[in-house]
Amino acid sequence: MTMNQNPPVYTGDIVKQDIDPSREYTAENQEIVFNDEQHAIWADLFAGIHQPYLLEHLCREYINGLAMLQLDPKRIPTVKHLNVQIQTRTGWRIERTAVRYTLADDWYAKFAQRIFLITDYLRTRDQMEFTPEPDMFHDIFGHLPFLTQDFYAKIEDKFAPAYMKATEEEREVIKHLAWYSTEFGLVMENNRIKVFGAGIISGRSELTHTIMEFYRLGRDNVIDYSRDVFAQLQSHFLANKKDIHRIIAGVNEMHRQGKMSSEEQGWNVVRALYDKLGIPRTGIFGGDVILVPFDVETIALIPKTVYAFNPMFFVCETLEQMDSLLDSYLKPIASRK
Ligand SMILES: [Fe+2]
């Protein structure tokens, strides 16, 4: 049985792509000439998210960074433009790659050189709301506004030194930590939950579903927004830890069986899991995604769910808290001899 005879099983582990090394970009040929339709897709993606009713839910660091990055809403930026905005501010450099989803070993080898890879792949018209594979809109619009800022560069600087010295098992945890922070993290700001992760910001479906959950928590009286919101998230987390762990075990089981995405059930297959486990769809389990405080132990247990809506998002009290929680896991590994 070879890989070619079977379609890839989307378990969240990315199937290794066959990349012709001669197709990979060099330092000299980083720029691509895009056609009008590609610029039009970019413009529609940009306009789709650049809406006041969505932007108000993004954290202030993102909004500030987006202004600094000076993206043209109508045109895909050049690598040169991105580097002018980013390299001068944080020292990180942008490099274009032909690889659609870079494997962690290659990704962190670049991170160690403070290089952030952007793919040359742009989603198609039928994926405007949701693309399972991160494309250049995700890489550029989702991540790069942050990379103009020192706090984000400092967070990204932590991963490679730990990854290089980590055991295989620890590498998995490191991937989960990156996934649930810079890709799908949430952060408190003025007692409101705001979106931080690039994976949510760059996907209209993820973003709107996440925002709908903020509203649902209030509407269903799970969270009282006139009181300390983070404290309420904490107490819901503690009170429901047992069921949260049963859900995580169920997600792992589905992940192992390659059932994290399903044609019949669409992108959110986890809701059916609650019914199977007999967990009533109320309280923190009443929406599309469970919001819990950022917790390294819990994040270590829950797989990356690349081809489906994430079952759980983690909320930090502040970005400084995210920073120190990441340090608590990454620093001891990075400082090994
Ligand atoms: Fe990403």
Image (tube, rainbow, N blue to C red):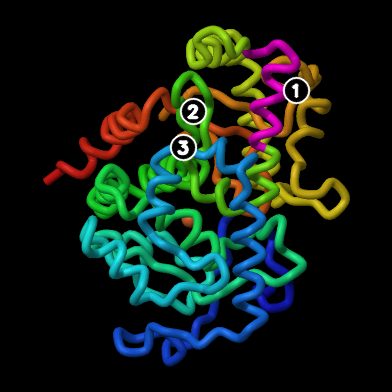
Q: Residues within 10 Å of mark 1 (few under 14, many from 20)?
A: some
Residue for badge 1:
286
Q: Which mark is residue 256?
A: none
The residue labelled by disc 3 is 59
Which is more N-terminal, label 3 or label 1? 3
Q: Residue at x 84, y 54 (%)?
A: 263
Name the magenta segment's main secondary structure.
helix
Q: Residue 3's quadrant in the figure?
A: bottom right
Residue lying furthest left in this view?
337
Magenta-drawn segment:
210-223
* Residue 33 horizontal side relative to residue 114, left or right: right
Q: Which residue is mark 2?
A: 315
Q: Residue at x 56, y 33 (%)?
A: 313
Secondary element at tag 2: strand
- Residue 219 in magenta stretch: yes
Above or below: residue 88 compared with residue 211: below
Task: Name the residue type under label 2.
Answer: Val
